[in-house]
Amino acid sequence: MYQKIPVSDFSIGSIPTIQDLEFNYLKNIIYEKTGISLAPHKKIMLQSRLNIRLRQNKISSFHDYVKKLKQEPDFFKSEIHEIINRITTNKTDFFRENHHFEYLKKTALPAIEEKARFGRKTVRIWCSASSTGEEPYSIAITLHDYFATKPGWDIKVFASDIDTNVLTHADKGIYKEDRFAAVPKDIVMKHFTLLNNSSDGKEYRIKPNIRELVTFKKINLLDPSYPFMEKFDIIFCRNVIIYFDKPTQKAIFQKMEKVLADEGLLIIGHSETLFGITENFKFLGHTIYQRKPQNQL
Ligand SMILES: C[S@@+](CC[C@H](N)C(=O)[O-])C[C@H]1O[C@@H](n2cnc3c(N)ncnc32)[C@H](O)[C@@H]1O
């Protein structure tokens, strides 16, 4: 998994600790800027993720760090991006929750194909919390393989995240061997090129024909609206709303509805639900939802 905090960056015995006052200040700005809602028991997690920022800024206590954030607007402006990059949890995998990719192949893509008999041969998918890229590349591989023998299709996967570090990683499309532990060998051989085979292990890069299907961009799901001209057939919003409270989830799905086609699909993570959040989607099972047509709302 993408490493947030290199352990070697710490010298044992000199770790500043965070007090309630500083935790509350940081928790509030993180909530305001990202929607991520930190429970009180996350104090130690926050402390360990931000300790490196104190070291890099040569600040010896959380008290001084928070004081600088409060008193120096320029410092706040640049530091807030670093805080966001440190605080996000980026756990992901290739073909994570594989039943969603099976659903794409067996149900969603055939339905899109059927609809296209009377219209444009396009597929537009937004992966809205793409982390280090495993999820959008899994989508792109699924689309590529499905449409490989069907000419004339225009396929685009739009991938976004709030964390600029993971976006840089995703953009390169280079992954260590251990990321493929649960991926069938033939998929790795077909869609990745071996880059390095050193004592540190093997590294693979996504092949250009898959890479070019995916565009990465920084988007904060808290932004007032989402910057798309075209509507999406499918939105993946998996394993991110668990970090948000209900009002934030409601606001996000209201904005997603506006960029999702009538009867388009919204796919969320295994521990997430739209129950009690919005009634504008029909539940299809396995955390897959379908936007109700405008005339049924
Ligand atoms: C646990 S990962 C999930 C990755 C992938 N969707 C999956 O299911 O494997 C959550 C991702 O959401 C991103 N995230 C958190 N808050 C966000 C926000 N306000 N806007 C956009 N992305 C956000 C994080 O940076 C992180 O990469």
Image: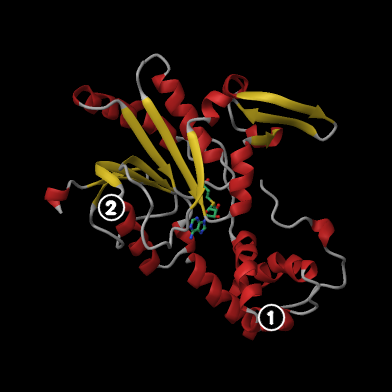
Seen at 66% across and 23% down, the residue is 193
Q: Is residue 237 above or below residue 20?
A: above
Q: Is residue 224 above or below residue 228?
A: below
Seen at 21% across and 27% down, the residue is 119
Percent across and percent down for residue 141 are: 49, 28
Q: Is residue 166 left or right of residue 236?
A: right
Q: Is residue 216 left or right of residue 198?
A: left
Tell me if I can see residue 166 in this picture: yes
Q: Is residue 146 left or right of residue 1?
A: left
Secondary element at image label 2 = helix
Seen at 59% across and 29% down, the residue is 183
Q: Amino acid at mark 1?
A: Lys
Q: Nearer the viewer, residue 164 or 44?
A: 164
Question: Dot 1: few (<14), some (14–19), or many (≥20) neighbours within 10 Å?
Answer: some
Q: Is residue 90 left or right of residue 252?
A: right
Q: Which residue is mark 2?
A: 258
Q: Is residue 161 above or below residue 124?
A: below
Percent across and percent down for residue 94 are: 56, 36
Percent across and percent down for residue 55 are: 80, 69
Circle number at residue 68 = 1
